[in-house]
Image: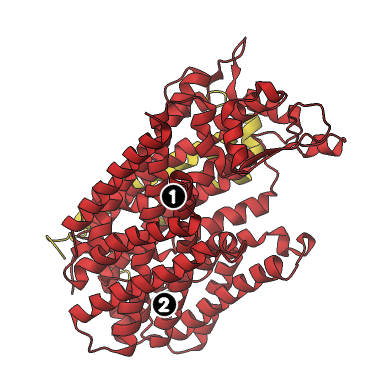
């Protein structure tokens, strides 16, 4: 069987599975559409949340970023997992107890204000739209490579599949497809890592190989020593030491963590389980499932770096492996023989300073995809990886689509514009809204506004960290916080963060103008404090919230009893 | 922020805050502490994990493992509090 046959087989089987599940669990009522009826088991919800959370970008790019950045890449590892600790102990159990189905719902009721609800809806739509564009693009790219079709057609195929099961099935449909998708992702991510770990370190468990010995050389050396040595020889900084300043590293990690805790599509997943206790259990499962992939990512990154350099650097044209031509053809790797000696030279900043030239360039994204080729793994492993990648993109796109459609149908139509909407009409609105949102996302997936999408996806975390996260935390932990404070805080936090990002990304701000040396990626952390401070100040100057709101807070804080 | 401490509900909330405080302190220590702020010092002065420097390992692996353990402790701790203050949930909500 050729590679194409394997790809078709694996992806075909996985699609049949997703669609079968979606048809079986089609949503009938708004409660099923928004929160899957509220009776999903903690274990299943944990898997679904993990799949929802891990996007195509995480799946494809993270290991590549780690391979290139070394220690600095830890900010993503800690940021995107540590956020779940914040999310679990500070928010979701209380929001679940509150018992409504969307995040703007909580903000609107807790701060007894339509204006607060509207601000929240706008934040939710903005965050989700920027995110989903990247997912659609990812699906399009993978499909176009697989079936040799154009990216636009690839995007459209992906969009119609997502609409079919997310738009029709609602939360109920996507929860169970995401469970299946998580399984595909976990297998396809860990199996190649295990093969490579055996080949390079003689260790079945990649995480042990990572801290073990590199056995391909005589005598065996510690793997990380080998990696540092390779980096140093080529003029890069040591793999285990970073180049980011400590304060920047701190702020970016913090912005990612708080942003994770403020992402609406992750929060709503916890509304699908039965009660507060189930939320806590479910959060344990979620983070465990995510950890499976996040603990593997640094090993894949490190192995891939050694593999890549060993098989390319210092090789002449005849010695280059066959897969190199394949990636060269798609322009994902390029070799330009600058000094004309016919040998590949891959060089880092130190050597370039010393007058040598770097001849090899490659995108960070290809590490995961190229890894099995580099390690010479069987074809079915590569096909499995393709299926995993598509699963990652589809599951995240579906989760985001759901938040987008409920924001419009529930928070905007039902709660603000047309309160007399019936249950049936509300679902119709939700389905219509998801189609609309998907068309917008597909359009931007086909015509990405240049680098804008990639950047805004990263900054969506900063925006979530400076808007939703502090507002939700104060809404639960402070009985004194009122609507004036919350609205002022949200607006101040998001304006500060957005302003900083726009100034440095689009208006030509330079590095030496950074506030305390913090890059735009980490500014959401400061924005969060701006939000907290402004909100606290405004709240002390304005009247305290009415009695029924203080009672609502007491109720939210205690599981079980409704008195 | 004044909280009532005399009612059962007030005491439950205080106990909950204590739990959150303890867990978040550990959370901060393992990630920002070991993984970022103290990393250089730990790399040099602490025993290696396998062949990896301690601080580096904490940032890439250890912190994530700790996060999972923290969430498990949270679930058990809160379950105990729920039982102690009799705010346990019935079937459904």
List x then y, in percent, for residue A19: 25, 53
Q: Colour of chain A?
A: red
Q: Foreground residue, B66 or A447?
A: A447
Q: Colour of chain B?
A: yellow
Residue drawn where x is 37% and y is 54% of the image: A394
Q: Chain of mark 2?
A: A
Q: With A285 as the anchor, is A506 left or right in this view?
A: right
Which residue is labeled 2 in the image? A121
Q: Chain of mark 1?
A: A
Residue B29 visible: no
Disc 1 crowd, CA 10 A, few/some/many (<14, 14-19, 20+): many
Q: Secondary structure at mark 2?
A: helix
Residue at far left of view = B91
* Up-down relation of residue B24 to residue A563 (above or below): above
List x then y, in percent, for residue A358: 77, 37
Q: Secondary structure at mark 1?
A: helix
**Picture quadrant of residue A175:** bottom left
> Which quarter of the image is occupied by the C terminus of chain A?
bottom left
* Up-down relation of residue A290 to residue A422 (above or below): above
Which residue is labeled 1 in the image? A143
The CA span between labels 1 and 2 is: 32 Å
* Up-down relation of residue A64 to residue A169 (above or below): above
List x then y, in percent, for residue B5: 32, 69
Closer to the eye: label 1 or 2: 1
Say if labels 1 and 2 share a chain: yes
Residue at far top of view = A218
**Picture quadrant of residue A112:** bottom left
Q: Foreground residue, B89 or A152?
A: A152
Residue drawn where x is 59% and y is 36% of the image: B56
> Which quarter of the image is occupied by the N terminus of chain A?
top left
Residue A474 visible: yes
């Amino acid at each position: 069987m050729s590679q194409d046959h394997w790809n078709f087989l694996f992806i075909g089987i996985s699609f049949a599975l997703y669609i079968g599940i979606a048809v079986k669990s089609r949503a009938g009522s708004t409660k099923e559409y928004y929160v899957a009826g509220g009776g999903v088991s903690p274990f299943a919800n944990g898997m679904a949340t993990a799949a929802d959370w891990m996007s195509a970008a995480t799946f494809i790019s993270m290991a590549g970023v780690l391979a290139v950045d070394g220690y600095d890449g830890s900010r993503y590892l800690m940021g995107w997992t540590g956020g779940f600790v914040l999310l679990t102990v500070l928010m979701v159990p209380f929001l679940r107890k509150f018992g409504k189905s969307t995040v703007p719902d909580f903000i609107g009721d807790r701060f007894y204000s339509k204006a607060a609800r509207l601000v929240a809806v706008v934040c939710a739509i903005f965050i989700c739209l920027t995110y989903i564009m990247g997912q659609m693009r990812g699906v399009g790219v993978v499909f176009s490579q697989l079936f040799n079709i154009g990216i636009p057609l690839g995007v459209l195929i992906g969009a119609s599949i997502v609409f079919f099961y997310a738009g029709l099935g609602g939360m109920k449909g996507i929860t169970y497809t995401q469970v299946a998708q998580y399984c595909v992702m976990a297998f396809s991510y860990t199996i190649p890592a295990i093969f490579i770990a055996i080949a390079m370190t003689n260790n079945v468990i990649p995480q042990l190989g990572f801290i073990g010995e590199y056995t391909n050389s005589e005598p065996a050396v510690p793997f990380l020593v080998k990696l540092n040595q390779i980096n140093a020889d080529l003029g890069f900084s040591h793999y285990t030491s970073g180049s980011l300043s400590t304060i920047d590293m701190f702020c970016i990690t913090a912005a990612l963590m708080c942003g994770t805790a403020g992402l609406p599509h992750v929060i709503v997943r916890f509304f699908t389980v039965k009660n507060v206790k189930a939320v806590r259990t479910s959060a344990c499962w979620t983070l465990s499932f995510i950890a499976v992939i996040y603990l593997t990512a640094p090993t894949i990154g490190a192995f891939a770096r050694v593999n890549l350099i060993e098989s390319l650097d210092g090789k002449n044209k005849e010695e280059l492996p066959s897969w190199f031509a394949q990636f060269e053809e798609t322009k994902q790797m390029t070799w330009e023989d600058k000094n004309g000696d016919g040998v590949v030279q891959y060089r880092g900043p130190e050597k370039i300073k010393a007058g040598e030239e770097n001849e090899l360039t490659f995108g960070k994204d290809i590490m995961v995809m190229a890894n099995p080729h580099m390690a010479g793994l069987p074809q079915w492993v590569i096909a499995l990886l393709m299926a995993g990648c598509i699963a990652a993109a589809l599951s995240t796109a579906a989760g985001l689509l759901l938040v987008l459609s409920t924001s419009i149908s529930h928070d905007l139509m039902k709660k603000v514009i047309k309160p007399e909407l019936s249950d049936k009409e509300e679902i119709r609105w939700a389905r219509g809204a998801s189609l609309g949102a998907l068309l917008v996302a597909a359009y931007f997936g086909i015509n990405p506004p240049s680098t804008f999408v990639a950047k805004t996806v990263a900054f969506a975390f900063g925006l979530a960290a400076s808007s939703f996260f502090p507002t939700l935390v104060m809404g639960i932990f402070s009985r004194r916080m009122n609507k004036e404070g919350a609205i002022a805080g949200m607006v101040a936090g998001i304006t500060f963060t957005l302003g900083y990002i726009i100034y440095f990304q689009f208006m030509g701000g330079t590095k030496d103008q950074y506030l305390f040396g913090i890059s735009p990626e980490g500014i959401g952390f400061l924005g969060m404090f701006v939000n907290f401070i402004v909100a606290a100040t405004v709240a002390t100057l304005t009247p305290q919230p009415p009695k029924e709101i203080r009672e609502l807070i007491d109720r939210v804080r205690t599981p079980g009893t409704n008195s | 922020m004044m909280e009532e401490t005399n009612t059962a509900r007030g005491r439950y909330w205080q106990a909950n805050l204590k739990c959150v405080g303890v867990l978040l302190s550990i959370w901060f220590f393992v990630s920002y502490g070991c993984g970022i702020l103290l990393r250089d010092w730990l790399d040099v002065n602490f025993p290696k994990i396998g062949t990896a420097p301690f601080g580096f390992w904490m940032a890439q692996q250890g912190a994530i493992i700790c996060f999972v353990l923290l969430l498990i402790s949270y679930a058990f701790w809160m379950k105990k509090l729920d039982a102690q203050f009799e705010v346990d949930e019935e079937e459904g909500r």
